[in-house]
Amino acid sequence: MERKIFLKNTLAALGLAAVAPLAVSSCGKDTDTTTSTTDGTTTDSTTTGSTTSSCTVTSTETAGPYPTKTPSSYVRSNIVDGQAGVPLTIKITIANTKNSCAALSGALVDIWHCTAVGYYSEYVVNPGGGYTSVDYTSSHFLRGRQTTDSSGLVTFTSIFPGWYSGRAPHIHVHVYNSSGTSLLITQIAFPTDVCNTVYTTASDYKAHGTQDTSNTSDMVFSDSLVNELATVTGSVSGGYTLTHTVYVAA
Amino acid sequence: MKIIRLIYRKLIDASSTKPWDQLLFEGSWYEYLLQAQTFNPEKKYNTFAELITHVPNADRLHFLVTPAITGYLKQLNGRVPDITNNIGKTFLPFKNFKFEIVNSDITDKNKHQVAVNFISEPLTWHDIIGNQLLVTLNNEPANGETLTEMFSIQPFLSIYSIQS
């Protein structure tokens, strides 16, 4: 009983004094808060004298790191992510058929293609169903997004795609307008002579050999090759550059 | 002694209030709107459930939307959010995760709901004290003692795997 009264009186007497240190500490830097969290023991509080009775244990720990708005990790020009292959620079121009084929600026361009041996980045499905978890530092290799500049151009750094059974070599393209509305999903085909050179001489491709499906027999390109065939120049040793124009109605 | 890994399924929707949750919500919603168009060119379906039911390969959307949120996972510095030990600190290390779209509707942002499944790094389980699990992270003993963690199993936290 005596102790209670003593505490009560002390609190009242120290009312003002106790508020002041609190105000100071609440304005303090984050590091102050952290220190009191890790080192804040009863002993420390007692030695500070008058503040003892007003102290409470600091709740949990300092918030942070403070989240910042982060763009989708698709947004990058270099999409190689450690995949082996012959360097390929991909230059795609987006033109607008509703504006006399003028360049379309501000369009989002997604591309994706397979590795030198014909695989896409994707989730692995468990034998029992459901997806296998992935490391948060791993990436969606050979997939990327860029926004067209005033010339309607996007540029990606990648590798020459390989091929997989039943399809001619290709790059997928999805074009959106600046507000994200889909304008076109299409694919880009490769000249056969260049493919033959890469697939028979470049070390990452040789074992897989030449493609089993030609552009003319491909189910996607057979009726539209003239629109979808890219220009590809360069060499296995120096890398290749692909240029292509995609026409959209925007 | 058993080695366990925990799983924490963090649900995020329009009612989430923490800044990190809201950023992840916005990012995944925008990316979902982009990517869903691939599977829904004629806008025949509004909901994710309809897409999954009617469109082959629409379940790839889980994977395709993931890059929208990996930047936010990196901001966590390898520590599972929300799950605190008995002294009130986050402690659970993770590297692996599975992102999932739970529900969505291209006509109603309020119906967008996603989940991040955080899968912890292996922990050594020593005992149960009261309602608390006593574990050690795979840390090296220092000065002859190994530091421990105590925490309680809470909603949406479960044991993912066990190894004797």
Image (spheres, coloured by chain):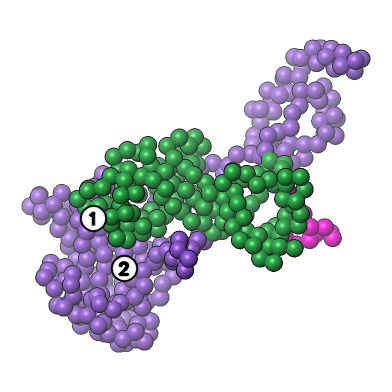
Q: Is residue A123 left or right of residue B34?
A: right
Q: Position of residue A241 (x, y in %)?
A: 26, 71
Q: Quadrant of residue B58?
A: bottom left
Q: Which residue is mark 2?
A: A113
Range drawn in magenta: B138-150
Query: Which chain is represented by purple in the image?
Result: A
Q: Which residue is mark 1?
A: A175
Q: Secondary structure at mark 2?
A: loop
Taking the spot 77% from the left edge, 17% from the top edge, the residue there is A17
Q: Chain of mark 1?
A: A
Taking the spot 74% from the left edge, 32% from the top edge, the residue there is A57
Q: Is residue B127 left or right of residue A245?
A: right
- Outermost residue, right side: A2
Q: Is residue B143 magenta?
A: yes
B40 and A64: which one is in front? B40
Q: Position of residue A113 (x, y in %)?
A: 31, 68
Q: Decide if residue A179 is in sight here.
A: yes
- Circle 1 residues within 10 Å: few <14, some 14–19, many ≥20: many
- Circle 2 residues within 10 Å: few <14, some 14–19, many ≥20: many
